[in-house]
Image (cartoon, grey):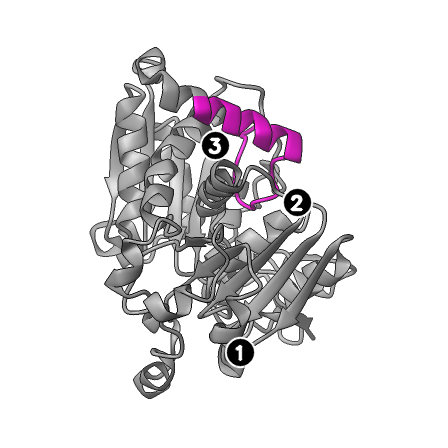
Amino acid sequence: MLTGKNLIYPTDFTVEQLEGLFRLTDDIIARPEKYARSCVGKILATMFFEPSTRTRLSFEAAMERLGGKVLGFADPASSSAAKGESIADTIRMISCYADIAVIRHPAEGAAHVAALHSFIPVINAGDGGHQHPTQTLTDLYTIRTKKGRFHDLTIGLCGDLKHGRTVHSLIHAMCRYENIHFVLISPEELRVPDYVIREIEAAQGCSYTLNPDLDDAIRQVDILYMTRIQRERFASQEEYLRLKDSYILDGEKMKNAKEDMIVLHPMPIVNEITGAVDEDPRACYFVQAQYGMYVRMALILSLLGGEEGYPTVCGAKMFEKTCVNPRPNGTVHCKNPKCVSNLDLTLPIRVKDGGKICEYCDATIEG
């Protein structure tokens, strides 16, 4: 089996490798013609089991601008997943046709499973409410460009922090830098998961406060990262409707912010930022989306071998294929109902941290 280089978690790259990736992004922006034929003869497969606009199109545009080609699907109903095919078998088939694959899936840990079974590099484009590392690369590049540093920052994260995989990934990445303070702005029902809090508490030089008041929090922050309340993650429509207007950033709130604060948003914006804020020079979310294409160009080049190879947390070891549930009654299982291991019972349980944490989705394991 080939040894793949994957991006499954935002910390799969070292800090030094990230800087190399961002320097490559700088050069692609400055000299796009230099890279116009870098991926001629290469094929990118897009496996989108969940809706996407910016992420899917930016990956497709990135590969096209590098001279490569794209194949794939944007609707699981048009793939063999609708017939019951497993993620493992889907990625094995994709590996026969493409040179690199991008996967978005509603099951948390799905990209991890794909990487473990793939013969080609795999990129996680979002797995449920768990991680979204390529959005994090985009966020980091925007912060680097607009703020000029990754240290000594107060970052406000506002909205649906429970289901917001972009928030989880950004915290995961920023915990490696010095003197980072997170202000977590959410209703109690949508507060950040415990595994993310544990990461902040374990990181040297990082701290956090919980502040449900956006009007107060906006005065403190250097970066305000707004997120939408994610309707598709709620079990009930009533609960969504009750919480959907919890935070709305408008011109009045912006008057209380620092003059050099920047506003980021992973998009799409629903109603949590008013149109008046779009005209504020501190609003950086549209240029942030544009940077996403260039960052993904650099990522594709790097994982295909154009730059120094990057390691992956997952490695490239294949699970033994099983046709029956390998977990007898009474075995451990993940508490997270959205974990890929609870949706595909042929997957063996994988644990870390002394058997306490699910390796797929970072949730707690129970007996």
The amino acid beneath tag 3 is Pro
Q: Which residues are magenta?
A: 1-26
- Mark 2 secondary-structure assignment: loop
* Mark nearer the N terminus (3 vs 1): 3
Q: Determine the residue positioned at 73% across, 66% down.
A: 356
In this rendering, the answer to whether 182 lies above or below 26 is below
Q: Of the residues under marks 2 and 3, which one precedes in the sequence?
A: 3
Q: Position of residue 43 (x, y in %)?
A: 32, 26
Type of amino acid at the residue the image marks with label 2: His
Occupied quadrant, residue 106: bottom left
> Can see residue 334?
yes
Q: Residue 121 shows which numbered tag?
A: 3
Residue 205 is left or right of residue 128, and the answer is right
Give the Cα separation between the discs numbered 2 and 3. 31 Å
Q: Badge 3: how crowded within 10 Å, few (<14), some, or many (20+)?
A: many
Q: Is residue 117 left or right of residue 40?
A: right
Residue 241 lies, in percent from the top left, at 31, 83
Closer to the camera in the image, 68 or 288: 288
Residue drawn at (69%, 75%) of the image: 367
Q: Which residue is mark 1?
A: 212
Q: Is residue 250 visible?
A: no
| Residue position for label 2 | 151
Label 1 element class: loop
The first of marks 2 and 1 along the sequence is 2
Distance Cα–Cα, label 2 vs label 1:
24 Å
**Residue type highlighted by circle 1:** Pro
> Disc 3 versus disc 1: distance between alpha carbons?
40 Å
Quick one: SS at disc 3?
Answer: loop
